Each structure stands twice: as structure tokens, then as C-alpha cells.
Image (cartoon, grey):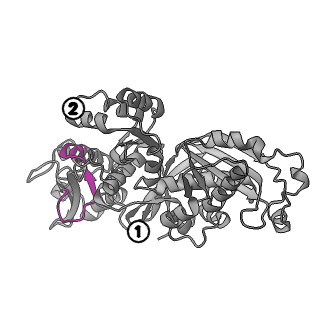
Amino acid sequence: MFAILDIESTGGKFNEEGITEIAIYKFDGEEIVDQFSSLINPERKIQAFVVGLTGINQEMLRTAPKFYQVAKRIIEITEDCILIAHNAKFDYRILRTEFKRLGYDYKRKSICTVELSKKLLPDEASYSLGKLTRSLGIPVSKRHRAAGDAKATVELFKLLLQKDSQKNIIAESQRLHPVKSKDKKLIRLIEEIPAKTGVYYFFNEAGEVIYIGKSKNMKKRANQHFTNDSHKSKQIQKEVSSVNYEITGNEILALLKENQEIKDIQPKYNRALKKRNFTHALFETVNSKGYIEFKIGSAQSKETPITTFTNLQQAKSTMTRYVEEFELCQKLCGLHKTKGACFNYTIKACHGACVQEESSEVYNQRAKSLIEQLSFQRKSFLVVDQGRKTGEKSIILIENGAFKGFGYVALNHQLKELKRIKSIITHMDDNPNARHIVSSYLRRKNNRFKIQELPK
């Protein structure tokens, strides 16, 4: 659990400042679960430049509560939380100073989103909250006011959580709340994980990720680990101390996220996974008569494939569908081995390319249309799909035929500048597994995604 806060102060000499406004959002990694915001009477003078910056003046604070009147609420809302702030060193120091004046030793773990942004967003020109949020397209309602800046920090922190493929931030939170009873572990699992599409994580007492899984129904799938009596499940039941999850909004993002994070984190109970989740691929050649021929072969081939398949059966059934859709020849698609005409020619479903009745030029036009549809080599585009909640959409970036990663943006956000798109997405490896996941998804029928072409 995280307490994301922002503090406005009076300014003045070091450790003599007072709080003029505070806003705290309690955040569970997915949504805000509690919040507190208030002006504070600092009982001291506000520096003139601070008044000009924040708009908060002495008259506004005359009837505001003093710090001791809100101190209990601040303790309660931040209990068992990690404090998150943009320039946390300042906010945490000011908060501790106010509590020290009351004779209370206030201590919390803290994370600074400035330092975190420098690590996870290394190419930004500036890490001030104003410039960073503008660069990332994060709206700020009231700049230099506690509630507006804290809310913007929540959105920034969401993005940083998404980009933290090593799960170091969540691991730090999990270490605060280890659960030792097996029954309590199961109860927490059932209560905390939603029945939604996403990726879930099992942590041990040391805060290490020991297993990563994905599912359309995370609650159901994760719960199976606690009811299964296989050797691996029993070991997970014994070692797991806490769980976490990330809703992805759709299945392809869950697949991509799981694929990347298992590679990055290498949890001990995911190591038995196959390195590749596909075995077969589709290749093209041109025969001696000038016709494009398709061949299903091993994905381990050194040839560059048009697309890949999970298994041979999927490859054949997919190609059978494309033979009908693009009016192709079974023989030239590797589905009917014969020296003469293919079966479809005998039932007048093939135009005769197998016996050279249809010219190679005409036939190849349709074959090239299929290649264009299946392959995204040298193309630059976005796959735009539903997001995690209403008012949000997800994006997958393909640049010059390479998979770059995915991210989330507001529904009305205009996606035109490649630089801004790259700053929003979580960058991922362009490996064969990731390309297979994307190409398989694009082949599916009845998907609701949209393709947005980008300039080369």
C-alpha cells in the first residue's frame, strides 16, 4: 500500500518551515482507496514568493485547522504505507518536522518519484513535475496546489509501476506485510485478486517474486495454485507470503507482460517454462514457374518467417482459412501434395495456378495481399485496444517492423508524435516470443482492436 502525498509549505529557513496545505491519496497499486486533503494554519508567516507560486495567502489560512488537529488523520491514512512524493526528501522532512514539534517520532519508508523517473524514464529532458507530466500527457488540475500535484503524482506513479518490469517497487511494499499462516494466505488471495484479465505475482517473505502467471480470470487461476496438489503448487503454497496483480484490460497485454517479466525477473517456479511458445512458422518462396509458394516449417529455421504458429495443427487450419479467404491454391500453400491439380481445382474453388491456367502475376497479387496482412516487417503502427477502465485505451507500438512495447492513454489522447508515444509505453524486448504473441493476436477474427498507421 502506498500513500502518495504533496505538501505546500511557508518557505523560510531550513527546518523552520510550516505546512500550509497537504493532500494524501492512499493507493493500492490499482486505485485510490482513501484520501485526505486540507489547508493548514502554519502559525507562522508565509514567504511572499510562496504566495505568488501557490496562491495560498495568510487570510486563506486564518480559519484552517492547525497541524495538531489533523495529525491523527495523517498517521491513520499513512499507516503501513510507503510514502510516495515528487522530491520525497523535502515532503518527508517537512512532515517529520511538524510531528517532531508535537513530540511524536513519525517514521515511514519513502520513495521519490523524481529518482524513480530518472531510472525508469531516462530520456526525459526535465524531471520537474510540471515538465514531466506535460511530456507524458498527464493532466494537472491545479499546479502548485497539494491536491492537484498529488493527483498528478498518482498518475505518474501508475506509469512508473507499469515500467518497473523487475517489480522492485511492489516487492518493497510486500516486505512490509508478510503473511505466515497458510490459511490467511489463501484468504488474502481470494479477497485481493479480482476476477479480471491481467498478470498476478506471488512473493515470498523476503519480497522476492517466486511465480508470475496471467489469466483472463486472475482470481480463479491464482486460486488453483492453492488447491492443486502437484509438487510445484505445494512448494508455492509453502513459500508464498503475499500476492499482487496488475490488470491489463485485455489478453494480449497480459501475454506480453508475462513474457517480458518472466525473462527479466526469472522467478524460481517459472524456470521450467519453454523458451518459446510457438513451434511452426510460415515461409515464402517463388517457384520455377514464377508463382509464390507458401511452406509451413519449423520455427527454428534460420529463414525469416512471415508469421509463426503455436503448433502444426494451428498452422494448417489457419492456412486452410486463408486459402478460402484469398482464393489461393492448396498445392502452392503446402496443403495438398500432388504433381497435378489441387483438390480445390477439381471443385472449381481454385483458379488453376497449380496447373498454370491462372497467370503468376494475377495469382501473386492475392498471395502478396496475404503476406501484407500477416507480416508487419518494416511497418510502423499502433494496435489500439480497450484499456483497464472506462475512458482509457491501450496501445502497442510496432516501429519499422520491431515490437517496442505497450502502454495506456486517455481515450481522447491524440497519438501522433512518436517521441511522446515512446515516453508513454513500457519498453519491451523485440524477441520471437513477443512477435509471435502480436502476430497471433492480429490474425484473430472478431477482435475489436484498431490499427493506426504511423509515418515511417
Query: In 3D space, how far apart are the residues under numbered discs 2 and 1 (Cα atoms)?
Result: 44 Å
Specify whether 443 is left or right of 35.
left
Q: Residue furthest left?
A: 339
Specify the segment rendered in magenta: 299-317
Q: Position of residue 456 (x, y in %)?
A: 46, 71
- Residue 230, numbered label: 2
Q: What element does badge 2 sit on?
A: loop
Q: Amino acid at mark 2?
A: Ser
Q: Nearer the viewer, residue 277 or 373?
A: 277
> Is residue 92 left or right of 346 when viewed as pictured?
right
Circle 2 packing at 10 Å, graded few (<14), some (14-19), many (20+), is few
- Mark 1 lies on a secondary structure that is loop
Q: For the point 59% across and 53% down, which residue is it?
A: 84
As displayed, is residue 383 above or below residue 119? above
Q: Is residue 418 magenta?
A: no
**Tag 1 or tag 2, which sits nearer the N-term?**
2
- Residue 433, image x and y in percent? 29, 55
Compare residues 106 and 364 and report the one nearer the observer: 106
Tell me what residue is drawn at x 38 percent, y 68 percent: 378
- Say which of marks 2 and 1 sits in front: 2
Image vertical order of residue 203 relative to residue 114, above or below: above
Residue position marked by numbered label 1 in the rendering: 400
Residue at 17% x, 52% y: name it: 334
The location of residue 14, given as percent across then percent down, is 72, 66
> Can see residue 297?
yes
Q: Is residue 396 visible?
A: no
x and y percent of residue 309 in the render? 25, 50
Residue placed furthest toward the front: 103
Give amino acid for label 1: Asn
Q: 248 or 385: which is nearer to us?
A: 248
